Image (cartoon, helix red, strand yellow):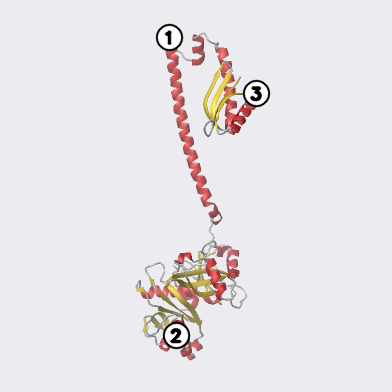
Amino acid sequence: MMDDMEPRSLRVSFDGTDWLATDMDGNTFTLTAGDEVALPEITIPELPETVVVSTVLLPVEHLLSRSFSLPLAQTRFIDQEILGQELEEHSSEQAEDWWLAWQGGPSGAGVAGMMFGLPETVRKQIDAYEGWRQASYIGVDIWTRLNASLKANLKAKQFEDAVAVLDADASGICFGVCSGGDESQSSVGFWHGMRRLNWGAALLEHQCADLAENILRSLQVMGWNDDSGVAVGRLPVALEKALNLSLWKGESAELSSLPGRNEANLAIDVASDLNFRHGRWRAESPLGNLKPWRRTLAMAAALAVIWTTGMVWQNHRLNVQLKEAQQRIVTAFHTGLPNEAVMIDALAQLRKATGGKSAGASGHDATIWLRQIAGVHRVYQQTPWKIRELSFHDGKMTMSGVAADLQTTNRIREALQQQTGKTVKLLDTDLSGNQVKFRMTWS
C-alpha cells in the first residue's frame, strides 16, 4: 500500500502481478489489489478518496490483441462495430465481451493495423471506483513502449520498409513490426503485429538461442526481413548476440541493468493515439453529467442574450415614443391655449376650453379607458395579436388588428368579453391573405 503521503494524481502500471504508481513529484507507490487471480482476470485496486488516477498502462497478456486488414478507403471509417464483426468472424471471441481500441494506416487497397480489447469486466471495475473513473488515458503497455522506442530511434525519418522494434526489460521483451510512417506526424505508421515474451534470468541465460529463434520467426511472420530490414530498440547483450541482427540500430545492456516492466512503462511520457478512453467511454469529469446538455444550454444562453437585447431595445424605443408623445401634448396645449401658461391636466384643460365635457367627466372617462386597456392587455398576454388601432370615444371602445386565423379572432373576442364584462361585437373581418384582419367594438 501507499505510505502516509497520498498524492493527488497517479500514473499507474500493471505488469500482471504488481500495480506500481508514481505521482507528479516522482514518488513511487505499490498498490494492493487483494487476492491474486489467474489470467486473464484483472482486479482493480481501491484508492483513498483523495487520490485519482490519470494514466493506466495494462499488460498485453491480459488483453485481446489482434492485427486487422480491412477493405476501407480511410482509417476514419473504422469503428467498434466493424472491428467487432471482424473479431467474431476470425476468432471464437464475442465482441460484446471486449471494449476495443485500435490504430491503423493505409495498406494496399485498404487499411491495416492493430486492435486491442479491454475486458468488459475490467471496464466495469473502473467505472465502479471514483478515483479510477477520472483516468483520461488507459492504454496497452506494449503499444506505448514500442511506439516510444520507434519514435526515439528513427528521429523523425520517414520509413516505408518494415522496421522491427524490440524493447526489453528485466522480465521480458516487447517486439513488433511497423511500416509506412513518419515520426513528425501524430502516428508513426501502422503496425503489422506485436508480441511479448517473458523470461526469467535462468531462461534467458540457458535458452537464449531458442528465444532468439522464436523472436526472429515471429518478426518474419509480421512481414520483416532480417536480410534487409532495420531493427531498433533495446536488448540484453546476450540476446543481441544470439539474434545477430544484420541492421541493428539500437542499444544493448546487461540484463541486470534493465528496468523492471512497470518501471519501463512509467518512464515513458505517454502521448499515444491508442486509448481505451474514447467514444462514449470518455473519462469522467466534474462536469461530465452536463455534457449531453451542452448544446441545449448554449442555445438557451443564446436565446437569453437575444431576448435581453430585444427587451433593452424595446424599452429604449418606448422611452423615445413616450418623450415624443409628451412633446406633442405640450405643443398641442400651447397651440390651443396660448394664453394659459400653467399645464396641469392637458386633456381636461383642452376639453374645457372647447366646451366639451367637464374635468370630472373626463376623469371618469379616463378611469373607464384605463380599465378597458387593462382588460385588453390581459387578453393580449394570453393570445397575442397585432393591434393596428385602439380608440375610445364617448364610452365606446373600437379596436382593429390582425390575427393568425379566424379561430384565434373568436378566442380574442370571447376573452375580451370575459375581461371587460362588455358585449364585444365583431364588426367585420377580412380573410384575404394568410391572416385575418378584424375590427371589434364594445361599450
Give the numbered dot on residue 216: 2
**In the rendering, at what x and y percent does residue 439 appear?**
56, 24
Image check: 375 left or right of 305?
Answer: right
The CA distance from mark 3 to mark 1 is 43 Å
The CA distance from mark 1 to mark 2 is 117 Å
Q: Is mark 2 on a helix, strand or loop?
A: helix
- Residue located 47% across and 35% down the image: 312
**Residue farthest front in this picture:** 432
Are the two marked residues, 1 and 2, in contact with CB atoms closer than 8 angstroms? Answer: no
**In the rendering, at what x and y percent does residue 69 appear?**
48, 73
Q: Nearer the viewer, mark 1 or mark 2?
A: 2
Image check: 420 left or right of 233?
Answer: right
Amino acid type indicated by mark 3: Gly
Can residue 3 be seen here? The reply is no
Q: What element carries label 3?
A: loop
User: Could you say which quadrant of the image residue 240 lies in?
Assistant: bottom left
The CA distance from mark 3 to mark 2 is 100 Å
**In the rendering, at what x and y percent does residue 310 appear?**
47, 37
Residue behind mark 3: 421
Labels 1 and 2: the sequence-earlier one: 2
Give the numbered dot on residue 434: none
User: Could you say which quadrant of the image residue 415 lies in?
Assistant: top right
Q: What element carries label 1?
A: loop
Amino acid type indicated by mark 1: Asn
**In the rendering, at what x and y percent does residue 40 appear?**
58, 76
Labels 3 and 1: the sequence-earlier one: 1
- Residue located 44% across and 86% down the image: 239
* Crowdedness near tag 1: few (<14), some (14–19) or many (≥20) residues, C-alpha within 10 Å: few
Position of the C terminus, as image quadrant, is top right
Amino acid type indicated by mark 2: Leu
Can residue 421 be seen here? The reply is yes
Residue behind mark 1: 339
